[in-house]
C-alpha cells in the first residue's frame, strides 16, 4: 500500500505533455488572428502617394514637351512681326513729327498777316545795287535777312546802312513789321571773303506775344 502511494506521487510521462489549450491570461502567448495587418495599409498608402506624385510629374513633363513646339512657333511669329512693328512705330513717330511741323506752320501762317510770296517778290523788286541776299530766316518773331555787300569795307557799311533806311521808308515793310534794324556793320566772311550782313525785321509785339505760336 505504501508502495502504491509512493508510485502515485511520481510524475508520469503523460503529466509532462504540454497542455492543449493556451493560457488566455497571458496575452503574449495568444496567436495573431488579424486578417490584414496595419503595416499593409501603411505600405499601401505610401505606394499610392508615390504613384500619384510620379503621375503628376509625368503629366507635367508631357505638357511641357507639348508646349515647347508651340512656344517656339509663337516666338518665331513674334520675331517676324517685331520688324514690321518697329517699322510701323518709327513711321508713326515720323508722321507725328511731320504733323506737328505742318500744324505749327499752318498756325504760324494763319496768325501772320505777312504773305510769304508777296514778301519775296517785293524784296526782289526793291533790292538795291551792291546787295546780294543769300538766305532769310522766317520765324514767329520776324524775319532775318542775310546777304553780302559788294565793294570795300568803307563802301559796304554805307550800302548796308542805306538799305536799312530804304526798308524803313518802304510802305510794304512799314505795314508788316514793327522795327527794322541793322544790328552790326558788315563783317568779312572767313569762307567766302565777302562782307556779310544781317538785317532784322520784327513783327508787331501784339501779334508776336498773343496770337503767334
Image: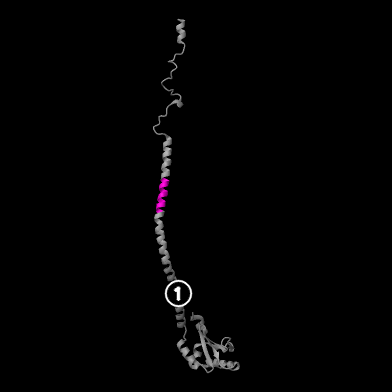
Colouring style:
one colour
In the rendered image, residue 209 lying in the magenta stretch gets the answer no
Location of residue 211 with respect to 36 vertically, above or below: below
Label 1, residues with CA under 10 Å away: few <14, some 14-19, many ≥20: few
Figure disc tally: 1
Residue found at the very far right of the displayed protein: 154
In percent of width and height, residue 102 lies at 45, 79
The residue identified by callout 1 is 94
Which quadrant is home to the N terminus? top left
**Which secondary structure dominates the residues rendered in magenta?**
helix
Secondary-structure class at tag 1: helix
Is residue 101 depicted above or below 44 in this figure?
Answer: below
Q: What residue sits 46% from the left and 75% below the top?
A: 97
Please tell me in which quadrant of the rendered image residue 16 appears: top left
Tell whether 81 sits left or right of 204. Answer: left
Tell me, yes or no, if residue 203 can be seen here.
no
Counting from the top left corner in percent of width and height, residue 133 is at 52, 89
- Using the image as rendered, state which of residue 196 and residue 144 is in the foreground: 196
Of the pair 34 and 168, the residue shown nearer to us: 34
The x, y position of residue 3, in whole percent, is: 46, 6
For the magenta stretch, what is the residue range?
52-63
Q: Point out residue 116 in the picture as x, y percentages from the top left corner.
A: 46, 86
The answer to whether residue 7 of the structure is visible from this angle is yes
User: Which residue is rendered at x = 40% and y = 53% of the image?
Assistant: 63
Residue in the image at 43% along x and 68% along y:
83
Amino acid at each position: 500500500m505504501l508502495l502504491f502511494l509512493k508510485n502515485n506521487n511520481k510524475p508520469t510521462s503523460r503529466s509532462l505533455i504540454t497542455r492543449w489549450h493556451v493560457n488566455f491570461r497571458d496575452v503574449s502567448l495568444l496567436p495573431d488572428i488579424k486578417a490584414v495587418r496595419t503595416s499593409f495599409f501603411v505600405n499601401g498608402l505610401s505606394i499610392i502617394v508615390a504613384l500619384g506624385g510620379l503621375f503628376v510629374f509625368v503629366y507635367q513633363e508631357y505638357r511641357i514637351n507639348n508646349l515647347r513646339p508651340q512656344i517656339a512657333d509663337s516666338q518665331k511669329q513674334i520675331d517676324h512681326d517685331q520688324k514690321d512693328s518697329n517699322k510701323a512705330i518709327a513711321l508713326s513717330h515720323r508722321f507725328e513729327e511731320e504733323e506737328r511741323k505742318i500744324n505749327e506752320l499752318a498756325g504760324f501762317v494763319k496768325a501772320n498777316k505777312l504773305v510769304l510770296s508777296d514778301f519775296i517778290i517785293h524784296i526782289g523788286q526793291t533790292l538795291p545795287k551792291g546787295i546780294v541776299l543769300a538766305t532769310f530766316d522766317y520765324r514767329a518773331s520776324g524775319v532775318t535777312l542775310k546777304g553780302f555787300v559788294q565793294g570795300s569795307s568803307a563802301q559796304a557799311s554805307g550800302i548796308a546802312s542805306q538799305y536799312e533806311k530804304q526798308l524803313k521808308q518802304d510802305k510794304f515793310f512799314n505795314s508788316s513789321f514793327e522795327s527794322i534794324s541793322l544790328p552790326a556793320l558788315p563783317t568779312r566772311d572767313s569762307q567766302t571773303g565777302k562782307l556779310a550782313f544781317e538785317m532784322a525785321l520784327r513783327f508787331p509785339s501784339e501779334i508776336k506775344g498773343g496770337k503767334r505760336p
